[in-house]
Amino acid sequence: MEVLKLATEWARAEVFSTRFFILFAILFLIAGIGFWQLGKTDMARAYIIPTLVAGVLLMSIGLGLFFTNKSRITQFETAYNSDASAFVKSEIVRAERTLNEYKTIVFKAIPLIIAVCALLIMFIHTPFWRASMITTIAMLAVILLVDGTAHARIDNYYKQLIEVEKYEKSNGLN
């Protein structure tokens, strides 16, 4: 039952974490509406579309992850009760895959995109493209912030699953 509790706690922490995507999405949407209502300069008006797009993207990410992890909580109990050993193995595989995705996408691709956007800001002088690059950097910084903590959580979860698997093998429970 320890494994089920471990998996459920991880999923609940993920559900909580995804709320930050939703919170930041709301902030970006409010900013976009604010620029639309109050923007007087070309630069301020240039932020309207990029901030609204970033808000919609973050909301999509947040809601998608929220409902995925929420449903995963109930699926864990069913999978664990049908075959605990297979559940542990499938979670290890899923965690490894997720850690590899984090390594590639979150910690390599996103910083590279941020660097490209920062360089483009120096060379592009039109308000819309500057606002787009700045908003992209802000949105990706939010993703790094939230996914950085999620990476630490799944890495810890993965290590605990490995310990459970080692324990099961050493005690012939596998």
Image (spheres, rainbow, N blue to C red):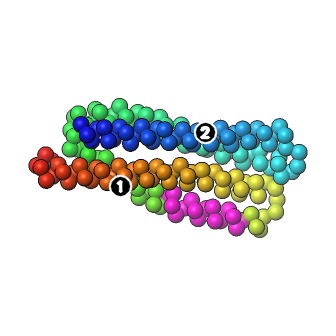
Q: Determine which quarter of the picture holds residue 7.
A: top left
Three-letter code for the amino acid on which mark 1 is drawn: Glu
Looking at the picture, how far across and down is residue 114, in whole percent?
A: 63, 61
Q: Is residue 14 magenta?
A: no
Q: Which mark is residue 106?
A: none
CA gap between label 1 and label 2 equals 28 Å
Q: In percent of the image, x 54 and y 38: which residue is there?
A: 19
Q: In percent of the image, x 62 and y 42: which residue is there?
A: 24
Looking at the picture, how far across and down is residue 57, in whole percent?
A: 61, 44
> Label 2: few (<14), some or many (≥20) within 10 Å?
some
In the displayed structure, would residue 38 be above or below residue 169?
above
Whether label 1 touches label 2, CB < 8 Å: no
Q: Which residue is mark 1?
A: 96
Three-letter code for the amino acid on which mark 2 is drawn: Leu
In the displayed structure, would residue 82 be above or below residue 138?
above
Horizontal side, residue 55 vs residue 158: left or right: right
Which quarter of the image is occupied by the N terminus? Answer: top left
Q: Is residue 46 visible?
A: yes
In magenta, the rendered stretch is: 105-120
Horizontal side, residue 27 vs residue 10: left or right: right
Q: How many marks?
A: 2
In the displayed structure, would residue 138 be above or below residue 65?
below
Q: Secondary structure at mark 2?
A: helix
Q: In percent of the image, x 28 and y 49: which residue is there?
A: 161
Mark 1 or 2: the one toward you: 2
Q: Which residue is mark 2?
A: 23
Looking at the picture, how far across and down is residue 32, in whole percent?
A: 74, 42
Q: Secondary structure at mark 1?
A: helix
Q: Is residue 93 visible?
A: no
